[in-house]
Image (tube, coloured by chain):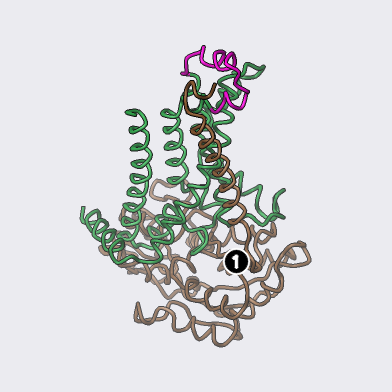
Amino acid sequence: MTSLLFGRDMLARTYRGTVLLVALALLLLAGACGSSKDELILATTTSTQDSGLLDVLVPQFEDQYDYNVKVIAVGSGEALAMGERGDADVLLVHSPGAEQDFMDAGDGINRQPVMHNDFVIVGPADDPAGVADASTAAGAFAAIAEAGAPFISRGDDSGTNARELQVWEAAGIDPAGQSWYEETGQGMGATLQVANQKNGYTLSDRATFLATQDSLDLEVLGEGDARLLNIYHVIQVNPDNFDDLNDQGAADFVGFMVASDTQATIGEFGVDDYGEPLFVPDAGKPEPGS
Amino acid sequence: MDLVWDGIREAVRILITGDEGVWEITFRSLYISGSATAIALVLGIGAGALLAFRRFPGRNLAVTLVNTGMGLPPVVVGLIVAVMLWRSGPFGQLHLIYTPGAMIIAQVVIATPLVTGFSLAALGALPPRLRPQLYALGASRLQMLWLVLIEARLPLFAAIMAGFGAAVSEVGASLMVGGNLAGDTRVLTTAVVLEVSKGNLDVAMALSFILLVLILLVVGVLTTVQQRERRS
């Protein structure tokens, strides 16, 4: 009966082809899942990825240790939340207040300072709010609020966002709901692009700003306030809390980040491209700013 | 406008110089979305045939769900698949999160309702007397299914194109379940997002053009096959 509509051969061919297709699909899926090396999930901030630092450090770490590192770049708030849930093994974050809460709750161990740089207040070159004239970060923010100039916030619970809110608090201003205040909910790079398009001000870590400024018309208008110090810590997620953490890998990563070779690499990172280092290595030194 | 021309120039430059990283993520896009489409075809055609040929209680509800699923927001799919696959989730032990496998799963979920919907339409449009005739001629149930699929193969190509198009162009789910890991789960769409946030707008434009060309090529091949079938 098959010959009525098509040859028997064609039917058989199609049948065989489909069986092959299904088998191939299953094989692909199985192949995509397997990985021989132990995975190590590093939850970190967008600034370490957008600046390109991790593109340098992670391959070095993978050369020295036999792990398959998965770098998940999110805000510090989400990175800490991933640690709380045991969805990451090790964290590289820059939100000291939230980190302290994380440690106090027993979610992390082995917290070490890695490096610092600073936050800068950036905005349009003609500086309509007169931010460059302010002597403190809080004064600069007050000038922006007074002028009603657009301010673009990360609004994503990241370390940068947390710092920005502290500066607003210091200035005695509640920016939430103000017509000139907008939240992107995105990473630093994307937020700088929005500020650029809207001729607005924003608070950025210096590394991301330097790494992306070629595509921006924004300039650094405020810097140097002690309130703008940006400190990165590496934290191992507490292995007592979860069974399936890669705690050896996490401990190795913490050790790698504070090792003198790595610290030297961090101190040199960015000099070739920007004429100045993007980060200052901190391991083994007293807490900067304390 | 400069940005568009810079983007095109950068895309041509990358394609000519054969930048290894770009080829790699292009092939990864093709591999992940191609695998997802293949799996979605098997599931979607099966479900489409069931809905087209069988009458059962709740069938209307199922068809409504399929039609809703054709507009399933990828970011919602991404979140749900991520919550399932995180180490803290019910399938955490499989260690699938942040792998190409996780991205294939998410894209299968996105593409399957599309393939189901298109299959349902294609099979539903066959002459109603075809199946009774095939049975009368002694076809087994499986033979019948193959024969009607071959009969409906032209509109079924549309199902493949729609499924692949949805899978390869989605970004929200891929970011969430894949993590945009260089050399592992970075595909064209997630690379565009990353390059924009890095401020490399020319590279982002170049990757976007490559993605468009990839879709054009795949759909072009499928359309050519489809139209040749129609003529023969």
Residue A272 shown left or right of residue A290 in the figure: left
Residue type at numbered disc 1: Leu
Instruction: Identify the residue shown where x is 54% and y is 43%.
Output: A21
Residue nearest the viewer, comparing B96 with A8: A8
- Residue A90 picture location, percent across and down: 64, 68
Residue A259 position, x and y percent, is 59, 85
The residue under the point 52% across, 39% down is: B110
Does the image show residue A142? no
Q: Colour of chain B?
A: green
Asked which quadrant contains residue A277, the reply is bottom left
Image position of B79 (left or right of B218): right
Q: Quadrant of the N terminus of chain A?
A: top right
Say above or below: B16 vs B190: below
Range of residues picked out in magenta: B125-146
Residue on which disc 1 sits: A42
Secondary structure category for the residue under label 1: strand
Magenta stretch: residue A119 in it? Answer: no
In the depicted structure, whether residue B205 falls above or below residue A267 = above
Coordinates of residue B98 in the picture (x, y in percent): 58, 57
Q: Which chain is brown?
A: A
> Subunit of mark 1?
A
Q: Is residue B158 above or below residue A70?
A: above
**What residue is drawn where x is 71% and y is 70%?**
A247
